[in-house]
Image (cartoon, helix red, strand yellow):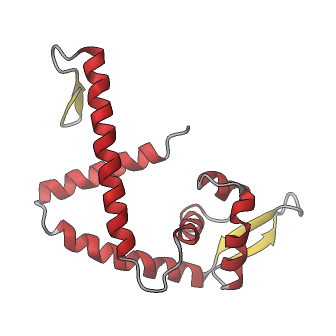
Amino acid sequence: MIVSGCVAYEEPGLGAAGATANRARAAVTVRRAVTHLGRRLRAQRPAGALNGTKLSVLSHLHRLGPSSAGAIAAAERHQPQALSRTFAELQRDGLITRRPAEQDRRAVVLAITEAGRDALVRDMAQRDAWLVEALEDLTDAEVELVRIAAELLDRLADRPD
């Protein structure tokens, strides 16, 4: 399959087996590139930065608002028990709050605090600055292609199992 502009079409003579092979090659290329870029971005994190799990929790709460521990765990592909220590540490550090859920007082709702938002913004800013500098090596058309690819990768990441 070839994508031209916003139109996708089958390459003549490629057939279903060829299209599957192309997707398999694309999967390998995407996985490698995402892994490599992720490694580079992690290297740009400031000294003493929060670990990846804590950043994921803060990012979830920042993007989606107050959530239950179970909802965060499901979104991050963890068991809720596996994140209980992370939640406790984030609360201890003043980065999130915990309060009883209105519908079920036994359940807990987590929310990001202003300090949590600040910590997340600081962490993202350093990595974003590196990425802006790296994008300077690309043409405007390539930067736009990377932006579109990033949107598509987000869609893939949000795909249900």
Q: Give me the residue at 40% from left, 78% from top.
A: 45
Q: Is residue 11 visible?
A: yes
Extreme-right residue of the structure: 105
Please state which of residues 49 and 75 is positioned toward the viewer in this rendering. 49
Q: Give me the residue at 71% from left, 68% from top.
A: 110
- In the drawing, does residue 138 fall left or right of residue 123? left
Residue 26 pos. (x, y %): 28, 38
Q: Is residue 68 visible?
A: no
- In the drawing, does residue 3 fall left or right of residue 157? left
Q: Give me the residue at 29% from left, 49% from top.
A: 149
Q: Is residue 125 above or below residue 56?
A: below
Residue 10 pos. (x, y %): 22, 20
Residue 78 pos. (x, y %): 64, 55
Quadrant hosting residue 65: bottom right
Q: Quadrant of the N terminus?
A: top left
Extreme-left residue of the structure: 139
Q: Give me the residue at 28% from left, 50% from top.
A: 148
Please state which of residues 148 and 47 is positioned toward the viewer in this rendering. 47
Residue 155 pos. (x, y %): 42, 45
Circle count: 0
- In the drawing, does residue 121 fall left or right of residue 56? left
Q: Quadrant of the C terminus?
A: top right
Q: Is residue 26 above or below residue 126?
A: above
Q: Is residue 152 above or below residue 112?
A: above
